[in-house]
Amino acid sequence: MTEKGPTPLERFINGILPENPVYRQVLGMCPTLAVTNGMKAAMTMAAAVAFVLVCANILTSLIRNLLKPHLRILVFTLTIATFVTVADRIIAAYMYDMSKQLGPYIPLIIVNCIIICRCEVCASKQNVLTAATDALGQSLGFALALASIASVREILGSGSWFGIEVMPAGWPDWVVMVLPPGAFLTLGLLLGAANWIGELAARRRTTQGVA
Amino acid sequence: MKDNYLKQAWLVLLLALCFGGVLAGVEHSLKGRIDENKKADTLGQIPNLVPGAVSASFSNGVYRAVTQNGDHAGWVLLVTGQGFADKVELLLGLNADASQITGVYILDQKETPGLGNKIVEDEWRAQFAGKSTQQPLEIVKRKAEKDNEIEAVTGATISSETVKDMVNRAAADFRRQLASGGF
């Protein structure tokens, strides 16, 4: 390591909120919108992405000194595709119903830009410990973002959370929330809220700095 | 020049070989389990695919569906074909003399989300039930009018054609085998 970057712990924390992949980097929008109509599907997706991200980051970091600059994207894609296929087969073997429900979205993790972004930005330049903590932080951030959107959509749209009824018996399901438009509405509002809170915090910091 | 290429690409080649090995290992160790899951799914779908059937026995590559009191109700075939994105696996239900389609169920597909993957929806699949196997089915891009017409999924002609072709081919093959006393 020649340049001084954030420490592994800082990278881990950064991934969760300050550089949250969904709310701050606005990456990985396809699964964020497509599989958040229920908590179960969203958490399966988050776990699969975490598995692929951690494995791909560690492997990329291990071979980082052997990478040829013009072939690196090819190597990243190859690595990611392999781990995605492993994840896909494991889900098909042990969570068959979920695998049918998620269908092509599991193979589509290959093109989830969060993963290739971490390989490029972090793992191909940092040691294994740094790459692994970075991947864990980003995965946790992604899982939190999916959980926040899926909670809103499942509770309002189906009156349940993880399939367990949570709303009073007379709750009229907001069907739109489980349909694609509900994903855009929820993401837009939560993204707006995240920006607003971020701005308030930043403003408070500057006024404190002046005083 | 040649060894220059190798010098550049040896890592990619080596990784491809290793990853290929890993995937073969994963497939080998999980295939049995995945097949079992699909078989359980198939058996669970028998009552929907063949009206009146409650269970089925597997022999010679087909499921023979029987009713509660053991009468032969129909057949269920597992059909595989190339879809728009990847392999499509479906179950085709036929009545006892294979003259009529009684149901279609998509077992595995990776078609485009929002377009091609609508082939799994009940409403679209229901078009197949009750169709005769005497003449090949056809996909049309309007309301189905004739007896052998199936309305395509909007924006997914290839996925629709795939399912239709698989059904036509499997039904014709099976009728021939049945006629020659194969079962």
Image (spheres, coloured by chain):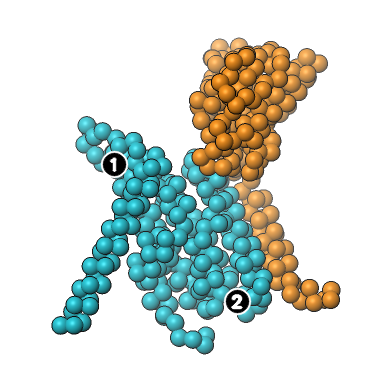
Chain colours: A cyan, B orange
Amino acid marked by disc 1: Leu
Earlier sequence position, callout 2 versus callout 1: 2
* Image position of B13 with respect to B136: above or below: below
Taking depth in this image into account, of A144 and A88 the one nearest to the observer is: A144
Residue A198's spot in the image, x, y percent? 28, 67
Residue B57's spot in the image, x, y percent? 63, 24
Q: Which mark is residue A64?
A: 2
* CA gap, disc 2 and disc 1: 46 Å
Taking depth in this image into account, of B126 and B45 the one nearest to the observer is: B126
Q: Chain of mark 1?
A: A
The residue indicated by pointer 1 is A156
Q: Which mark is residue B27?
A: none
Amino acid marked by disc 2: Arg
On screen, residue B47 versus residue A36, left or right, reads: right
Q: Chain of mark 2?
A: A
The part of the image, by quadrant, that contains residue B149 is top right
* Image position of B152 with respect to B2: above or below: above
Residue neighbourhood size for the residue with mark 2, other residues' Cα within 10 Å, grouped as few (<14), some (14–19), many (≥20):
some
Does the image show residue A120? Answer: yes
